[in-house]
Structure formats: C-alpha cells, structure tokens
Image (cartoon, helix red, strand yellow):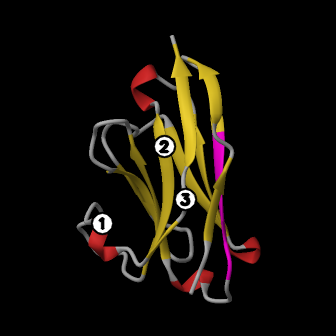
Amino acid sequence: QVQLAESGGGLVQAGGSLRLSCAASGRTFSNYAMSWFRQAPGKEREFVALINSNGDNSYYADSVKGRFTISRGNAKNTVFLQMNSLKPEDTATYYCARRASFLRPYDHLSSYDSWGQGTQVTVST
C-alpha cells in the first residue's frame, strides 16, 4: 500500500507563493498519474491539478489555471504544486492523490486509490 505525505503548507499573504510537495512510498510511483485536491471548511473536496505518469501532460481547474503549476520528479517519488499569486479563496487543506488512469473525468474522488493526510494553506488579506 502506497503512502503519500504532503508538506510545504503554511500562512502566506495574498499575492504570495508556496510550493507544496507530496512524497510517495513504493516502487511504482512512475506508473501513476498524480493529482492535487483541496478542501475548505464546510465545502466539498475539489480538484486542483493532475499530471500524467511521465510528467509531460497536465490539467488544471479553471480557478487555478495560470497561477498553479504541477510537476513531478519520478526519481524521487515526489509531486509538486507551485502556487503563485495566491488569493484568500485558495485557503484550504491540500491533498495529493494517486490514480492509475489519465483519462477524464479527473474530479471523481472514487477514481483515486490513495490519499495523503493533507497540508494546510492559509492565505491572508
């Protein structure tokens, strides 16, 4: 069973940047697509970004397109989320997740077989 561990969250002012990391255990990391989701208090978990298994294709939610960048380092079993121009509405707990397929839809939680525990991102005004 793979384990996913997010890090890099914190408190940042609006307009600032953060870089989240997700470290995965196991030997098959490069076989899977990886995604980031987020969940704000009282709201449903929402899709943020996905990257395919070899890192040459990605997809973003409209709300973060142009501001966030997902990337991965298969040699180190890590996926990243670079977040720029942060807004207060980006405040949430951010989760990484793993799925076998790169096919749409990307936002169905049941299509992911492993989740991390999350890292908190708070954007102040």
Position of 72 with respect to 53 (left or right) is: right
Q: Earlier in the sequence, mark 1 or mark 2?
A: 2
- 62 and 11: which is toward the camera: 11
Farthest front residue in view: 42
Query: Which residue corresponds to mark 1?
Result: 109
**Residue 93 bears which disc, if any?**
2
Q: Residues within 10 Å of mark 1 (few under 14, many from 20)?
A: some
Q: Residues within 10 Å of mark 3 (few under 14, many from 20)?
A: some
Q: Main secondary structure of the magenta part?
A: strand
Name the residue type under label 1. Leu
Is disc 3 placed on a helix, strand or loop? loop
Query: Magenta segment range?
Result: 19-25
Left-right relation of 86 to 25:
left
Callouts 2 and 3 close, C-beta under 8 Å: no
Residue 16 seen in render: no
When the figure is inspected, residue 94 is found, relative to residue 54, above or below; the finding is: above
**Which three-letter amino acid code belongs to the residue tagged 2?**
Thr
